Image (tube, rainbow, N blue to C red):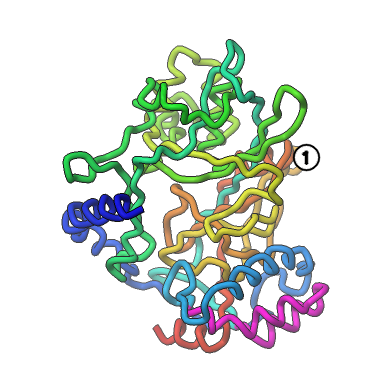
């Protein structure tokens, strides 16, 4: 452990000065505004079945109440400290139905419209828990590895050292006293980690493995029929790149037809160009076995709840906070020409490499075919309102 801390200190000392100027340009953007509104102003407030959000809130409140009262809430600083949430969480844990939760929200929370530069509209996508087929042993069928976190990977939370860098991280490995970039996707898939016994599992489809890296978690059906839950553990430090952008720019897929399903079809139809496209996303995810876990874990360190957990940009929103989301999603049955309205109480319980921006979110749709059919093509406009304990909301509204 002492050796690891020494490596970590060297890494931060070397990298931090080089990155400071860049990160200082990405502080709270001009024009970010939190404006107080009434609960009645929230689209669908009277119609939503709030009881469906209780499981997500229970998990977040259990987590919050397990932390020291003086600790800062994870994510944006407007989230305050644990003590600011304790009374609200204690009452949430006593709520046993939607009506009781509605009363708790009215008693403890203030909704805040989120806007930037006068614009309250942003983009909302979806993600899901994918199904793969795999084995503990490599074979002709099971030839694509899922890797555990390499021990030399150093992941630095820069916010620990500089408040203005909160929510930023960098990862790499230390060589000759310097933190250097870790191997990217192309190097790893070409064998950079082979022969080190870092394979967690072997799966039968490199395209499925690629989408597992994008989704962050999934279930693997083993040869005996059992299911193993696999979850995100760490990332190699390279920026996420949406490969769909390349397919659009090269005229392979029309912009209006772009979706995860469209990318999957292209990859399967172009096996000779598959690696070239996938390696444009230099980001690479390392996994851990979650066994019989309750569900995939988000960045807030709690299991995610289908249709009620939201991935957000933690630079702008605190994790564990309730969020009222008003957007829409595709019809999984393709029977409706218009998207389906989605006005629901969510909980900010996750983050993601592609989730960047003041008004940006990713809805977790759960596991199964329907979840994939909704999440895959979802890329819809919408708005959200942050719910904060009243004292914190007043400070946020005052700027």
Q: Nearer the viewer, residue 80 or 31?
A: 80
Q: Residue at x 47, y 68 (%)?
A: 74
Which is the main secondary structure of the residues drawn in magenta? helix
| Percent x, y of residue 309 | 63, 58
| Percent x, y of residue 158 | 31, 60
Instruction: Give the secondary structure at mark 1.
Output: loop
Would residue 97 be seen by someone viewing this image from the given angle? yes
With respect to residue 174, does 327 lie above or below? below
Q: Please say whether residue 102 is one of the residues in the magenta stretch.
A: yes
| Percent x, y of residue 111 | 59, 79
> Magenta stretch?
80-109
335 vs 19, left or right, is right
Q: Quadrant of the C terminus?
A: bottom left
Quickly name the residue at label 1: 335
Q: Nearer the viewer, residue 121 or 96?
A: 96
With respect to residue 74, does 212 lie above or below? above
Q: Nearer the viewer, residue 132 or 125?
A: 132
With respect to residue 22, does 97 lie above or below? below
Q: Nearer the viewer, residue 136 or 109?
A: 136
16 vs 226, left or right, is left
Q: Please say whether residue 145 is one of the residues in the magenta stretch.
A: no
Q: Residue at x 18, y 45 (%)?
A: 178
Q: Residue at x 53, y 23 (%)?
A: 206
């Amino acid at each position: 452990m002492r050796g690891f801390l020494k490596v970590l200190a060297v890494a931060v000392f070397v990298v931090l000065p080089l990155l400071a100027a860049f990160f200082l340009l990405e502080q709270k953007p001009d024009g970010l505004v939190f404006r107080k509104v009434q609960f009645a102003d929230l689209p669908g407030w009277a119609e939503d079945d709030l009881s469906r959000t209780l499981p997500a809130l229970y998990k977040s409140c259990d987590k919050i109440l397990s932390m020291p009262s003086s600790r800062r809430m994870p994510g944006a600083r407007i989230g305050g400290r644990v003590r600011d949430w304790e009374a609200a969480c204690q009452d949430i844990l006593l709520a046993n139905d939607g009506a009781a939760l509605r009363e708790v929200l009215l008693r403890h929370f203030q909704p805040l419209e989120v806007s930037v530069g006068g614009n309250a509209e942003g983009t909302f996508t979806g993600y899901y828990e994918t199904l793969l087929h795999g084995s503990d042993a490599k074979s002709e069928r099971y030839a694509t590895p899922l890797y555990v976190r390499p021990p030399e990977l150093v992941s630095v939370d820069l916010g620990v050292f500089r408040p203005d860098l909160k929510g930023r991280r960098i990862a790499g490995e230390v060589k000759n006293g310097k933190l250097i970039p870790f191997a990217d996707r192309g190097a790893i898939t070409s064998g950079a980690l082979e022969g080190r016994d870092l394979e967690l599992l072997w799966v039968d489809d490199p395209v499925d493995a690629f989408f597992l890296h994008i989704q962050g978690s999934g279930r693997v059906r083993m040869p005996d029929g059992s299911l193993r839950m696999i979850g995100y553990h760490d990332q190699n430090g390279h920026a996420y790149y949406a490969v769909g952008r390349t397919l659009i720019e090269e005229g392979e897929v029309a912009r209006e037809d772009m979706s995860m399903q469209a990318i999957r079809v292209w990859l399967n139809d172009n096996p000779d160009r598959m690696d070239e496209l996938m390696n444009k996303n230099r980001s690479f995810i390392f996994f851990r076995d979650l066994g019989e876990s309750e569900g995939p874990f988000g960045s807030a360190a709690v299991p995610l709840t289908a249709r009620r957990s939201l991935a957000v940009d933690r630079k702008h929103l605190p994790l564990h906070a309730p969020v009222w989301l008003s957007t829409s999603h595709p019809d999984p049955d393709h029977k409706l020409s218009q998207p389906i309205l989605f006005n629901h109480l969510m909980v900010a319980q996750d983050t993601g490499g592609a989730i960047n921006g003041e008004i940006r979110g990713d809805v977790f749709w759960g596991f199964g075919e329907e979840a994939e059919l909704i999440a895959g093509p979802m890329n819809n406009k919408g708005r959200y309102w942050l719910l904060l304990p009243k004292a914190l909301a007043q400070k946020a509204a005052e700027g």
